[in-house]
Image (tube, helix red, strand yellow):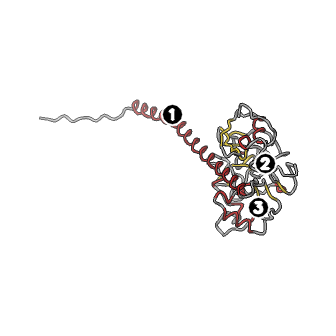
Amino acid sequence: MFRTLKQHRGFTLIELLVVIAIIAILIGLLLPAVQKVREAASRMTCSNNLKQIGIAVHGYASNNQDRLPSANLRSSNGQTNSGGANLLVNLLPSIEQEALYKTGNAYSGSFWDTPLPAGTSPSNTIRSVTLKAFQCPADYSMSGGFAANQVNAWGGSSYAGNYQLFGKNTSGSKFGGSDYNAAYTIANIPDGASNCIGFTEKMAANGSQGNLWSWPGGDWGNAWQPLFAVTNWGSWTSAPVFRPQPWSSGDQTRASTAHSSIQTLMMDGSVRGVSSSVSQLTWQYAFTPDDGNVLGQNW
């Protein structure tokens, strides 16, 4: 007897095309879900960073007779050296960067020019140190911890302090002078801590300028300092910029975000996402600590 051999039939071209089409559809359905998960994760990291900055601000206040840290310092007053520094610099000890703070504070020259051991940073100075605590993972204007237009030169920041709160000095002037000190303590903000923005997002690179964590500001100029709502500078009262494309089309005078909602730290320590539907006036009410206005319904 002869045995019949079984024939093994392969896929036909039509069947192969159908399988490929099904796989393509599944990938198409899966990608938006993956993107949403990534966005949620980066937003959570961003929110946590701001939460830590809020804890640092409150920690600073509790160690300094309830005083708020200064927007920027151009003279020695016990907070930093005579070379001056800014708001984020004064928070370094509270974000596990006390060694960096002490090194810069002990240097006789400018804080950002403090020399570091070879290999510590690209320029071997404090200004080219990059700090994860100041970086939002969604900030596409950031390149390896640097603002995309300052790679290997100045470390970038994705966050900025509210100049109307931290920079309104006790003489009543909101711009100019040698000191930029907050007029209020953390306990006596006129509109209340829960109604006043302390920090928010500001992308590391904005247009041709940006947001650098150690930039001194003040008489060094405003275009690169980690602050927003700086009086008499550009469109300081404007609402945030959402997802500028490309980042070089951004506005360095305004808060900005790579998220669909801008993550915002209130002075009571809470962090909330503010949607792109926020009006210019509501945003202005939220960052002005003493106008007595009630935040709008789009807050």
- Left or right, residue 186 beside residue 261: right
Question: Tag 2's secondary structure?
Answer: helix
Tell me the crowding category of disc 2: few under 14, some 14 to 19, or many 20 or more residues within 10 angstroms, Cα based.
many
193 versus 276 height, above or below: below
Rounded to the nearest whole Å, what is the CA distance between mark 2 and mark 1?
44 Å
Location of residue 64 in the rendering, given as x and y in whole percent from the top left corner = 74, 58
Q: Nearer the viewer, mark 2 or mark 1?
A: 2
Q: Which residue is mark 2?
A: 163
Residue 29 circle label: 1
Three-letter code for the amino acid on which mark 1 is drawn: Leu
Three-letter code for the amino acid on which mark 3 is drawn: Gln
Residue 241 circle label: none
Tell me the crowding category of disc 3: few under 14, some 14 to 19, or many 20 or more residues within 10 angstroms, Cα based.
some
Question: Tag 3's secondary structure?
Answer: loop
Are the two marked residues, 2 and 1, in contact with CB atoms closer than 8 angstroms?
A: no
Task: Locate residue 67: give its quadrant.
Answer: bottom right
Rounded to the nearest whole Å, what is the CA distance between mark 2 and mark 3?
18 Å
2 or 1: tag closer to the N-terminus: 1
Location of residue 176 in the rendering, given as x and y in whole percent from the top left corner = 87, 52
